[in-house]
Amino acid sequence: MSTVETKKRGHFICLRRDQLGARLLMILNCIRLSEDFGFDYLINWFPRNAAAPKLANPDELFSQDYMDRHFISNDEYEAMRDGAQPLHAFFQDKTPDRLLKHLNGGNHILLEEGFEVAVFQWENEEQIADRYRGFIKKIELNSLVASKMAEIDQAVGPSSAGSVSYHVRRGDILNEDPWKHGMWPAKIEPDELYLKHLEIGQPQMALVFSDLDESIERLQKEHPNVRGIKGLITVSDCTPCQQDFLELYAMSRTEKIVAPVISAFSSAAARLSGRDRRRFVDVLEPAQINDAYDRVADRFRGGLHNFVNLSEAAHVFSRLSRHLAMNDREQEGYDIGKSLLEAGTDNAFLPLLHAVNCIYLSQWQEAKINLDKAMSAPGLWKEDYASAMALLSHVNAALGDPIGARRLWLRAFWAKPHLPDVIVAGSALMERHRLKSGPDLTFDIKLLRSQRLPYIQRDILTVQRKMIKRKPVDFSLLTIEWRSLVLDRKAKRLLMDQKILKRIRTLVAQTSPDPGFDSFRGLLQHYVGRSKAARALTAEAIEAAPEDFLVNKRRAEVLWAANQPVRAIRHMRKLTELEPSNPFGHFMLARCLEQNEKPAEALHHYREAASLDCSTPAIHAALANCLSDQGQFDPAIEAFATASALAPTFQKFSNQGERLARKLANSG
């Protein structure tokens, strides 16, 4: 397909870089959107840097006619990105008008995220999800795959009543970089949970699909009636890619699907089946789950040889460790973690996991050693690195270094502000008076303490009640306050979520009258599109508290948004007068000056901000960009290096510095 054709009319374009299930879900969503809105869809099947080499040949699955109509190359896709919008950009709309205008203007919509069923506010999710079961017929598959699907229908169809499919996710998560170095608590479930369900349910047909043959064999050993795809149809003439697809299709034919909490593979199968997949919390009682985890602990006590390899043991331990801590058995978790480390397990997350149990047992020095080890491992994931920084800040506070603790937590916050461990560690620091408003970070402690979150259970390494007794602080208020300094893109999307912003606005309005609260509410009014109310609230607040740093800062932002730059800059200048040693005042003033075409003065204040700051990567990156724009390349490279050192998992700062260094070398 030529890019000239695609400019005439917008398309839905789907692409994923990961495994089959996610890619299939994207296609199903594109089919649905295409039907409902009248615009065709395109598929970039194997994007650059895709992480699933066995999917590199789409003709193993699809017919040539289908690929000719819908597939585009990487070059074509990249040429079409200009003006394109991600699908989530339209989720806050109340009507399809803006989406249709975008597509009618020849612009495209990208589906790059893990939507199970992509639904807009004006639609009924249940009605839409029910249609997905018929979409497999709209994907034209090659003749071999189609014939094997017919065989599966014959093998499973007559006996589908009472049949159960189990998805045991392992494969690349255990054995391949970088996946083995990240924790997957929502994807990896211990075998003992599957065995418990088999024991209780006694299904007439039990099909197990896994990317690790040893997992199927382990379940078959306990339950001989368990079968994999090879026991259902002949797949010796199929490629690994075709076998994966046929397993997904076979899963969709059974009466029930039991799978991990998050799994695109089983989610796609569930969409094709028209039924929801079930998690273990849905199909097992709490006592049965506890019994299964006791058996996991018994397997560890029996020795690490009971696992396929050390990596499997580490990933299963990542599930068991939290369960043990929840039941006040952290000493057992500590002992298992120690044995895995001594055995030479090389998963980058393991020292971090072991440090958590050290914290519970007040083994502070050992916790620090393991957190340092985790953070020095090149394979540690961004989220885990941020968690490690947050937990190390907790450890440093316990070891008597409150300043280091505060600065380390701030680095974690700027990287991943909404990560549960960052929230809990920050709340613990605040409750113990280790995190205070000041030059490291300026905030209204009364405002933060007025807004609390429910108990956090998901996606958290620590057990919250072992870290802090109260509900955690809602640090999303800090994300709103200092959004230009936050690095995480997903966190920045908070400013696009009108529902959350309005909820926070309502909660803040319920507090006692206070200039700080009122000015923050004014900032929220600005973000929900009520500019007149924003100006009125911040004007009242500045009259009541003319010398307050944050009240001036919020007033300036609202005035800037109202296209009153002179008045906004006047309030920004006052920030530097009120607190000359506060880097955030200099930074905010520098941004306004830079956008108001006063680069020399902006550079002065960026330099002031950077000289006063020890923990905010975006301040140093802003200085670097300003220096670069003014031709001061050597100091710009140094500033990028500082930003990179503060946020080493964000490659963009080191990349920018390297590009600038190459430019400088080439010009010399």
Image (spheres, helix red, strand yellow):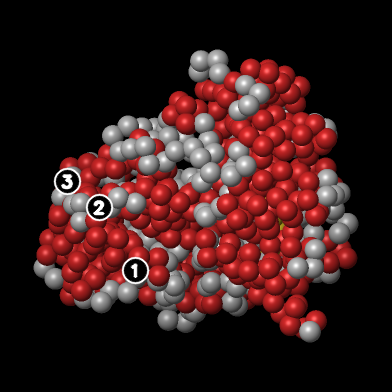
- Tag 3: Cα neighbours inside 10 Å, few (<14), some, or many (≥20)? few
Q: Residue 347: x and y, percent?
A: 34, 70
Instruction: Answer above or below: position of 23 versus 230.
Output: above
Q: Residue at x 60, y 77 (%)?
A: 57
Amino acid at pointer 2: Ile
Q: Closer to the observer: label 3 or label 1?
A: 1
Residue placed under numbered mark 2 in the picture: 359
Mark 3 and mark 1: span between their CA atoms?
26 Å
Q: Residue at x 73, y 47 (%)?
A: 591
Q: Closer to the observer: label 2 or label 3?
A: 2
Q: CB under 8 Å between callouts 2 and 1?
A: no
Q: Earlier in the sequence, mark 3 or mark 1?
A: 3
Amino acid at pointer 1: Lys
Q: Residue 83, located in which quarter of the rendered image?
A: bottom right
Instruction: Please state which of residues 548 and 145 is positioned toward the viewer in this rendering.
Output: 548
Q: Residue 639, located in which quarter of the rendered image?
A: bottom right
- Tag 2: Cα neighbours inside 10 Å, few (<14), some, or many (≥20)? many
Judged from the image, the secondary structure of the residue bearing numbered disc 3 is loop
Instruction: Please state which of residues 359 and 192 is positioned toward the viewer in this rendering.
Output: 359
Mark 2 and mark 1: span between their CA atoms?
15 Å
Judged from the image, the secondary structure of the residue bearing numbered disc 1 is helix
In the figure, is residue 102 to the left or right of 373? right
Q: Residue at x 71, y 79 (%)?
A: 662
Residue placed under numbered mark 3 in the picture: 328
Q: Is residue 132 visible?
A: no
Residue placed under numbered mark 1 in the picture: 373
Q: Residue 557: x and y, percent?
A: 71, 35
Instruction: Answer above or below: position of 506 versus 89.
Output: above
